[in-house]
Structures are given as structure tokens and as C-alpha cells.
Amino acid sequence: MRNAHRGRIAALLLLVVPLTIYIAVYVAPLLSIVSLSVDNGALSNRFVQLSEAIGSDDQDQRAAALLHDLASMDARERAEAARMLNQELGGFRSLVIDTGKAAEKIDPTMAGLVAFDARWKERAYWDVLSRNLASFTWRHFQKATGFKPDETGRLRLAEGDDIYLRIMARTLLIALQVAVLTLLIGYPLAYAAANGSRRLSGFILTVVLLSFWTSILVRTTAWVVLLQSDGLINNLLLDLRLITDPLQLIFNRFGTVVSMTHVLLPFAILPMMNVMKTIPKTQVDASRSLGAGSIETFLRVYFPQSLRGVFVGGGTVFILSLGFYITPALTGGPGDQMVSYYIAEFVKKSLNWGMASALSVILLLSVVVLLLLGAGAKRLFGGRVVEA
Amino acid sequence: MNNITKLLLASSCVFLTAQAVQARDFTIAGWGGNYQDAQREAYFQPFADAKGLKFIETTYLGGLAEVKAMADSGNVTWDLVIVEGADLQLGCDEGLFETIDWETIGGKAQLNSHAVQPCGAGNVVIGNGFAYSSKAFPEAPKDWSDFFNPEKFPGKRGMRNSPKMNLEYALLADGVPPEKVYEVLATPEGVDRAFAQLDKIKNLLQFWEAGSQPVEWLSAGNVTMSTAYNGRIITAKSEGRPLEFVWKNHIYNIDVWAIPAKSPYKKEALEFLKFANSAEPQAKFSSLMPYGPTNLEAAKLLPAETLERLPTGKNIADALFFSDAFWIDHSDELTERWNNWSTR
């Protein structure tokens, strides 16, 4: 009795270890990304006096507070704050750095500030400052969605600000196209591999796994070689006199979808094949012996049972597609870049990690919403599929 | 000994060696390709041989993400990196690079004044212009207005997916003289004017990511013209590819050696800068890779036919010096507008 109890505690303790590791390697970075997307500490902690004075009607008091805050930052902190303010308003960086360097010598009045640099007269700079004095900010999300509060505080989508929404929609569309295509191509292959002769299924598996084990970069570059203007396909069509001018097959949506479909095909085939292998062949025989034709048997007996594999394969391809960026960058045109491309740009080139995090969070949320919708749809229609 | 013990022993050996490598060798990050090959021959190897130092190389793709991660985590894995001017300035202000005491390393007088920076030593002058396939047109395109003229010069255009330099090219094509470009670009009307030029070729654009792509695309006929680095095109041309680089009104910038903050090899890195600033290795580098030297004496060591391939002398007579200061202030907003424009 006692031993059994102890055993259970030991098992529990043993489970705690992988759970902790899981939380550490999965959930913690996720939380840090979420916090990065709304964190404004780098600004709020450094403009302490200004955040008290910003509400005051006395211009000189605001100017003096700003100068005091700038003077108390070290050069590094000032540069970081300047970089963040510049993300909101071009030119703010040099204004903050120049003013900061001379902060102690400038007369602590608004007139003194404006005399040092006339830009301090403009309201835009003060508006950006006053928006960024809280330790928490929505500005990255506002930029990512394009919804910004207007003067009355109502959220409004200005024209041209919807760039990331458009890119998000495009990302979802491309992912959907790729998922559907991989399923259409993958289903017959998976069927043949699961039900065909040993030799045929071995051959299909080898081909699928070979391409699975080849680097994405190599496979993508291979498509460039095949599809470009004087590539193999165009040359073949020209030689056969089917076309007179080379077709534009790459650096557009077509090239992007084709190469992504090829790269992701194994992720659709393998789960479908595994599910199909579990469908007993005797059921097909039974259905035929009860008088159903081969098409009816497939549609009413085989296909519904293979749907689980279709959902797993399609879902995997869809989710993986959402994160693609190397393949579209190499085979797509300007109108085919997906959201990860811009996330990478913000991380690497503009050092705007807040914006990169906000876009990642939105991407993650849209996946969660889609999964929930999928689960809901399954609950609604799930029974009917089996019935049919 | 059974198999499992052997496996354990082997893996612990691997683990221990991995630990030993942690006390790592002198590490240099460069832009890869034949650019880095030439640097190895002209700088890395001679320097390492002279100092009896072991070095390893890695590839850098621009931006400050890696250097910032090193500074934030305290795990500094690079000792030298060759960066673009704007990144040097940003990183220097935020303390991501070591400051350089020019009095100690000396040699300042021999260098181009743009090369002497608080956190870096400018080393390589790069010409950014456009190239065309010499088979594509009966008449050769001569300047930026030809690049932006799809009626006279049909075909796709390669460009980098960034507003940097492309907006300048557009204004040059629109007839703005080089010395006025940044003045015009600083006004909202100037930016509109640049985008209006870009609209003319928008449906022909194809964006490149790496400097090798324009060479491949032009050779394969995917594009008829492309913006490009002079070095890549001129090297490919000397290998027999039918490519031409247009020097007229090109933009030149300087790549800069910088030392990531708290590098354990700071002393060696500073000695490297001293070596890299001197005339002989710079002349050697320029003879291997057609980019220009920053040491004013280096040109005297080079024959005339090499100088013709470099962004120096008469080639930069009507060129524009890339403004890091302008782009540090305006990159965020102009990149946003560029992305908005290019994805529509």
C-alpha cells in the first residue's frame, strides 16, 4: 500500500521534470515574445520627469523635464531611446541624440530648446513623446494592424496603413493554396503507397523521403533553375515550338506556390499514408460484396476513414507554410512575400524587435483562431461525415 | 567493453572537445563569397601568419541582430565584423562596438576621412550602380534615366528590396544632380518624386537578396538590367560573362571593420585594424577584388588597368557618397512606405 503510494509520487516527480523543461523551452520564449510586443520600459523608465510634467500647461516645465531626463541618461540609453522614438517619427533619432549631448548647456525653457533645434517647436515630436511615457504600449500592434486611435480616441484604419493586414491575408491565402495542392497531389500518391504492391510503395516512399531529406535551399534553387526564363521548362517548350517567347514561370505567385508545394509535399503524404495503412482491406471487400461499385466503395467506405490523415497532413502543411520565408524570397516577386519575411526584416535589419514580436503574436493568434474554428467545424459536421 | 559503454565514452569525448572549443579562436565575420575569399588572401592569412594566430571565419548578412544578441547575452562570439556605415553608427551609439583609440593605432593621416570612425575603420569602398547584359540591347544604356526607361530599354529589372539607394537612383534618373539628392529626398515632395519614377518600372521589378543574384539573373536572361555591386559584375565580366557595369552617377559607400563590444581578442583585433589600414594589403585586396581602398597611398601601388575597375579616380568623379546619417534618421519611415508600395 505504502509502496504503491510512493511509486505514484515518484512517477509524478518524474513527470514534473519533462513538464518543466517543456515550459522552459516552449512557453517561456512565447511569453517573452508577447511581453516584448507591448513593453515600453526602454522609454518609460528614462523619461521619468517628463512623464510627470507632460500634462502641465507650462511649456517651460515640460522643456526643463525633458532636458533633465536626457541629461541623466548615459549615451547608450539615449541612443536606444532615440532609436525607438525614430520608429514612430523619422528624424527623431538625431534630434534626441543631438539635444541629449548638449542637454546641460541648453537653457531649460521651451525657447531655449527651440533655439537649439527648431524642430522642438513642432507638435508631432511632443505627441510621440507623450504617447510613449507609459511602461506599456500598443504602438506595435497599432502599426501591425493599421488601427490607430484618432483625435477622438476611436480606432480607425487609415488608407495605406493596412499593409501588414494585407500581407497577413496573403500569407493565409498562400498557405491555403499550398495545403490544398499538396493534398490533391499527395492523396493519390499516399493511396498508391498504402495499397499498391510492395515495390511500388517502396519506390514512392524512397522518392518522398529523398526529397524530404534534401535541404530546402537546394530544392528551392532547383526550381529556379527549372522555371527561369532560359530554364529547362521554357527551353523545352520553345524547342517544341509550343511557345514563341519564354513564359514567366518564376518570381511570381506561380513559382512561389509550386516550389512551396514541392518542399512541403512529404508532410502531407506521410500522415495520409499512415492513416490509410490502418484502414482494413477487408472493409473494401465487404462493401463490394454487398453490391457497392468501386466508386461508391471509395466515397462511402474508404474516403471518410482516410479523412483523419487528410486533416493532419493538410493542417501540418498549412501551419508550416505560414512560417515560410526563404522559399518565397527566392522564387516569388514583390507581391508574394509572406509575413515571416517582414518579421525577419524587423529582427535583422531595423532592430525593431517590438514590431517583429507584434507580427509574430498576430500570426500565432490567427493560427489559434483557425484551429478553434476547425475544431468547431469538426464538432458540427464531424458526426455527419461518419454517417455518410 | 560493451557497445553502450563505447557509445557513452565516445559521446563524452565529443562533449569534452566541444567544451574545449569554447575557449575559441579569433573569429572574423565577413560577407562571404569571393569578397571574403579576397579578404582572406590579402588580410586574414598574412595577419594570422605574422602574429602566429589561429583564426576562424563566419558569414555575416548585415544588420545588428547578432551583435546586439552578443552584447545582451554577454556571449561574444565574433572579434571582428565588417559592417555597413549606418549599422556602425547605430551600433556605436548603443555601445555594441568597442571604441577605437586612433592615437594608439595611428595611420589616420593616410586614410580617407570617411574611413576614420569612432568605432570602426573604413576599409572597402564599394560602387553601387547598375549592370546590363551586353546581349540585351542594340544601344548601350548610359545612365539612370535609361534604367528607368522601359520603352527604350525593355525587360525586367533587378533591384534590392529596400528603399536605400533605390530612392537615390530614382531621383538621379529624374535629373536631380548628385549633390542635391539628399536635400531633395529630405522633403516629402522629393520622396513622392522618387516613388513616381519607381512607378514607371514597378511591374518590371524583381528583387534580389544576395549580391550574386544579379550576376546569375543577367547571365540567364531573367532580367536585362539590374542594380549591382561593381565588384560582382566586373569579376564576372573578367570570367567571360557578357555583362557591363555603368559607373555614371553611381553611389559609393564604405564597409567598415568593427570590434563587437567585450571581445576577448580586442588587442589582436586592434592590431588587425592597423594592418588592414595599411597600403600594401589594401592594394593586394583591390587587385583581387575590384573594390576600392581607403588608404590614399594604396592607389599608387596599383597599375592603371586595375584602377579602371575600382570605384576611385575618374570612376567616382560624378558619383554620390551614400549618406548614412540620412538613412539612420529616415530608414524606418521610408522602409515602411517602400514595403507598402512594393506589395501593392
Image (cartoon, grey):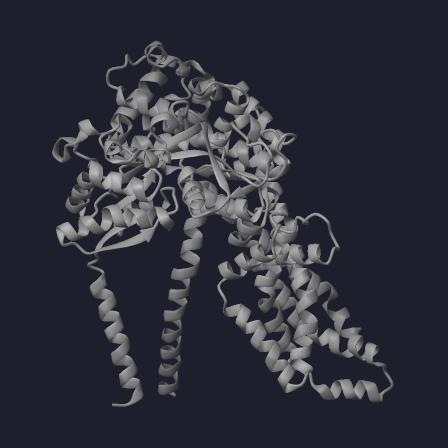
Residue A93 appearing in the image: no
Task: Please tell me which residue lies in front, B82 or B223.
Answer: B223
Q: Is A58 situated above or below B228?
A: above
Q: Residue furthest right?
A: A291
User: In which quadrant of the rendered view does residue B331 lie?
Assistant: top left
Is B31 left, or right, of B185 in this rendering? Answer: left
The residue lying at 87 percent from left, 85 percent from top is A291
The residue lying at 33 percent from left, 29 percent from top is A48
Is A53 left, or right, of A290 in this rendering? Answer: left
In which quadrant of the rendered image does the C terminus of chain B lie? top right
Q: Is B137 situated above or below A307?
A: above
In which quadrant of the rendered image does the N terminus of chain B lie? bottom left
Q: Position of residue A336 (x, y in %)?
A: 60, 46
Task: Please tell me which residue lies in front, A194 or A160.
Answer: A194
Q: How many marks?
A: 0
The residue lying at 37 percent from left, 45 percent from top is B65
Residue B295 appearing in the image: yes
Q: Position of residue B218 (x, y in %)?
A: 53, 44
